[in-house]
Image (cartoon, rainbow, N blue to C red):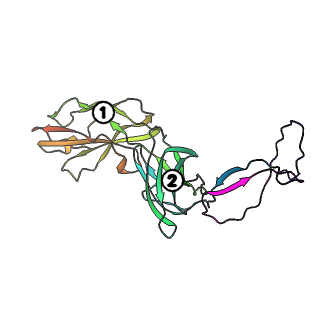
Amino acid sequence: MDDTIPSSGVDSEQTKTYKFPFHTNDGLKDIPIKVWIADNERRDLRTGPLETSFNFSAPPKIDPDFNAVLDRTYKLGDPIEINTTITDETFGNIKFFIDGKEQNDKQPYTVESNGKVTLKLSLTLPNDIKYNSHNLTIQAYDEYNTYSAVSKPFEFYIRNQPEIGELTVSNDTVEFDDQVIYVTGSFTDKDNGKQLTFYQHIEGRTEIHDIALEPIKHSNGGDNQQLNFTIKNLPLLETGEYTIYIWANDGEKKRYRVSKGVFSTNLNTVNRNKQVTYI
């Protein structure tokens, strides 16, 4: 700030910056302030006043340790549900930041009579977020765009569900024990470099465990990838009709099986030589 007293010049324009002490309390709105210039000899020689108004607002406060309701692993389209508490004078908005980038989603808040409000927020993850670990932070902005400190980061992970396309089987009837049933088709996964294991399950046969099919695949960022494997445990089946389910698993949780449903096929086993038993 420049505290020197200005001197007049002949037809000269001067620029000065001054500070004026003003004592107020948080929450005062539309305070009128007038500013003018007068000479030191005759106070009646002065400029017309420049009048403006100011708002004095304390920044909102946000719970730095907000709580994400669900676990730390999500897929595209999942909402992250958040509980937090805001302290403020009136109202404003909550902004979301993923890895420091502001998201196109802000959610309003209005405090209660005690100056606080507890919020249940929901942020839908953007479609372009990648398979990786990420940090989510939130920040409160009041009606004058005065903002709170940034919350502590919440670390979460993106793991998308693999999607099995149309699969076909080489034969839907098993006639002998060493018969091989081939399964061919394709799958996609929006993540990149994630290990995928494909499993089969025979409906109604709990004594026959779910079994991994070969080969293990690695996701390739949404590209269409080919599958080719054989049905297992056929010699263990008695004569009859069975439904065999096939799904992909990324190895972390069963909630990340197949986003477009589990592929199934019906197999008919006819009377055949049961002397050979193998798994």
Position above or below: 135 against 232: below
**Residue 9 appears in which quarter of the rendering?**
top right
Give the residue number, with chain letter if any, for mark 1: 165
Report crowding for label 2: few under 14, some 14 to 19, many 20 or more residues within 10 A (C-alpha): some
Left or right of residue 206, residue 56 in this image = right
Q: Position of residue 88 (x, y in %)?
A: 55, 63
Q: Position of residue 83 (x, y in %)?
A: 46, 61
In front of the other: 239 or 101: 101
273 inside magenta stretch:
no
40 inside magenta stretch:
yes
Left or right of residue 3, residue 274 in this image = left
Which amino acid lies under the numbered mark 1 shown in the image of this protein?
Gly
Left or right of residue 37, residue 189 in this image = left
Give the residue number, with chain letter if any, for mark 2: 93
The residue at the far bottom in this view is 114
Residue drawn at the location 23% of the way across and 33% of the way down: 181
Q: Position of residue 25 (x, y in %)?
A: 65, 66
Position above or below: 115 against 191: below
Q: CA distance from mark 1 to mark 2?
A: 42 Å
Q: Which residues are magenta?
A: 17-43
Q: Position of residue 96 (x, y in %)?
A: 52, 49
Q: Nearer the viewer, mark 1 or mark 2?
A: 2
